[in-house]
Amino acid sequence: MMGEFKQELRTGFIEACLHLVNRDFDALAKDFVTLGLLPPTAEKEAVTIALTGVFQNAVAKGVRNISFGDLLGNLGTTMYKFKFQIPSYFSLVIRSLAVLEGIAISFDPNYKVLGSTYPWIARKVLTDSSPQLRSSLETLLYEEGVFRIDRLESLLQESLRARTEKALVKKQVEDTDSRAIIKQVLSFTLTEKGAFVREILLQEFAKGLDALGLATLDSLTSAMPAPIPFAASTSVSSLTEEDLINLRTLRRLMLLLSGFQRSEGPMVEVKELSPYKNQGTFMEEAFLTFYQLPSIQEILPVLSVIPELSPEMQQQLLSLPADLAGKLASRVAARTIRRMFLR
């Protein structure tokens, strides 16, 4: 049996897997319409609620533990309720994947086809230059304007998983997990394919450093008897809730640079972060960010892999500080102008 799998359907399938793993069930409902599984007239909110109930528990196990049985087990009632359509191409794909997973399980009982293919999906989303996938990536990473660094971490870890594991097996004890991860992250972000993600990382670093500088300025202002020009004139912190989120994002980016060494705790979603408005909380976040700055021992693995990079990557790496400084200067200048003319 053979069938044609058009490019728009391939992209839709990739987006559906991406939204499923990241529990974005609202976007998944739209993907089902794109794939022809749901009619355009379907009630999106009701479908989202139903899909959440069907897939929530299965996805909670982690992408490496999701099986087709988990996904399809409770889907029957929902498909009947919302009048799902089963296109011919979809039947062929599901049958093929189910057969492949069944064959693989006979050799490895723990095999999961989605867990095995997701690293490729993550790499495709991070590196593909098509406007549709780049738009999907940006929408996934920026939820209501807030940067979801936990989702970027997950995509990077999964996209590099197979290569990192191979590198560790090849070199065995010569490399630590941290060093292998750092090398793979640099090798990806410094290439042309990683330019889109590199730009996002630089932008978020600039936001975090700007917030850190403002928090430091606030602490100095509160300790000075005379006011500092353009600084807040009251005892209330001039940092906003957005600055607090940027500080926390900067801390996570520091962990990313240190090869996830201290990133072993559960990820905290931005929506779960309580907005604090007192100066003490902002100062505490700033102190924690300073505390999270990589030590010399953590920077050494980064420095040690630089000579192993290609000359083009090394040149790109040398240009990053200037790019970051430019973005940071733009934010500081814009903030200063706002304070001068809008006070």
Image: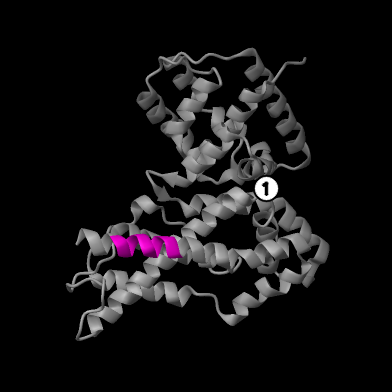
Residue 231 at what x, y percent from top left? 26, 72
Q: Which residue lies most toward the left here?
A: 234
Q: Magenta residues, as a range?
A: 329-337
* 279 part of magenta stretch: no
Q: Quadrant of residue 44?
A: top left
Q: Which colour scheme appears in the figure?
A: one colour
Q: Residue at x 50, y 63 (%)?
A: 326
Residue 5 vs 213, above or below: the answer is above
Label 1 element class: loop
Q: Amino acid at mark 1?
A: Lys
Mark yes or no: residue 160 visible: yes
Q: Residue at x 44, y 65 (%)?
A: 329
Residue 95 vs 193, above or below: the answer is above
Residue 303 at what x, y percent from top left? 68, 74
Q: Which residue is mark 1?
A: 193
Q: Residue at x 18, y 74 (%)?
A: 235
Question: For this view, does 6 lie left or right of residue 247?
Answer: right
* 331 part of magenta stretch: yes
Residue 334 vs 53, above or below: the answer is below
